Image (cartoon, rainbow, N blue to C red):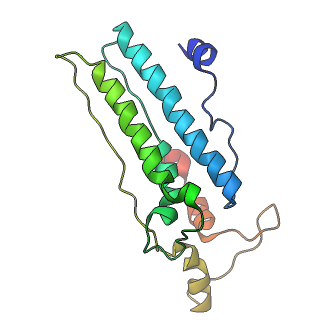
Amino acid sequence: LAAELDRKYGNHPLTDYDRTSPGLSDLLELKHKLMRGIEVKRRFAVDLLRRREHDFVFYNFAELHKAGHFFWKFHDRGHPDFSAEEPQLQNALREVYADMDRAIGSVLEQLGTNDDLVLVTDRGMYADYRGDHLIEKVLLKLELAVPRGPSNDNRPESWRTRVLNQRDIRKAL
């Protein structure tokens, strides 16, 4: 099946995708890649369901999550980074959601009367002002933490890395 997917649909547009810079051209490219990714997955989902070969099928559309992280600030007028100066991105989040709605609709059209669909989302999207990136600096300033030596690449380890290194993650896995 994986070989057939590769042959028929090619790689997902975000396969091997690097980081997104905040520039207009990179954000527009990301929007188009997310929308193409939804379309690739939609076509695959519809084709697979039409075959009626499987008792259980699971799809993961993660494009909305990434879209929320990058395009929320263009959608939410109350966001501190909101800017109406990028009209091509102002409706990007809605456009990606509309594509996802159409994809889900296509999947629904393939279901029979005895088929069940479970739709799950991990969370809603909202402006995130947690500031957990400041924890290490605050703890050091309050003298509630002691800086550790540099890691192998000569950068200081983050507090997350130090905490995770103190745990034996292999036992948890």
Q: Is residue 27 above or below residue 35?
A: below
Give x and y (percent) for residue 38. Answer: 49, 34
Instruction: Kindly indicate the quadrant of the structure image that contains residue 33.
Output: top right
Q: Is residue 58 left or right of residue 87?
A: left
The foreground one among 57 and 31 is: 31
Tell me the residue at 34%/25% (across/down): 107
Q: Is residue 120 above or below residue 149?
A: above
Can residue 53 be seen here?
A: no
Q: Quadrant of residue 158?
A: bottom right
Question: Is residue 138 in view?
Answer: yes
The residue that appears at 35% across and 25% down in the rendered structure is 106
Query: Which residue is located at x 68 percent, y 42 percent?
Result: 17
Task: Tell me residue 29's x, y (percent).
Answer: 65, 46
- Specify the farthest residue to the bottom: 142
Q: Residue furthest left?
A: 113
Is 151 positioned to the left or the right of 112 in the image? right
At horizontal 62% and vertical 18% (from top left) the residue drawn is: 6
Q: Position of residue 26 (x, y in %)?
A: 69, 52
Rendering coords of residue 63 (x, y %): 49, 43
Residue 152 relative to residue 30: left or right: right
As drawn, is 116 to the left or to the right of 14?
Answer: left
How many marks the image carries: the answer is 0
Residue 109, compared with residue 67, is above or below; it is above
Residue 117 lies, with reference to residue 66, above or below; the image says above
Q: Nearer the viewer, residue 31 or 155?
A: 31
Q: Residue furthest right?
A: 154
Q: Nearer the viewer, residue 68 or 117?
A: 68
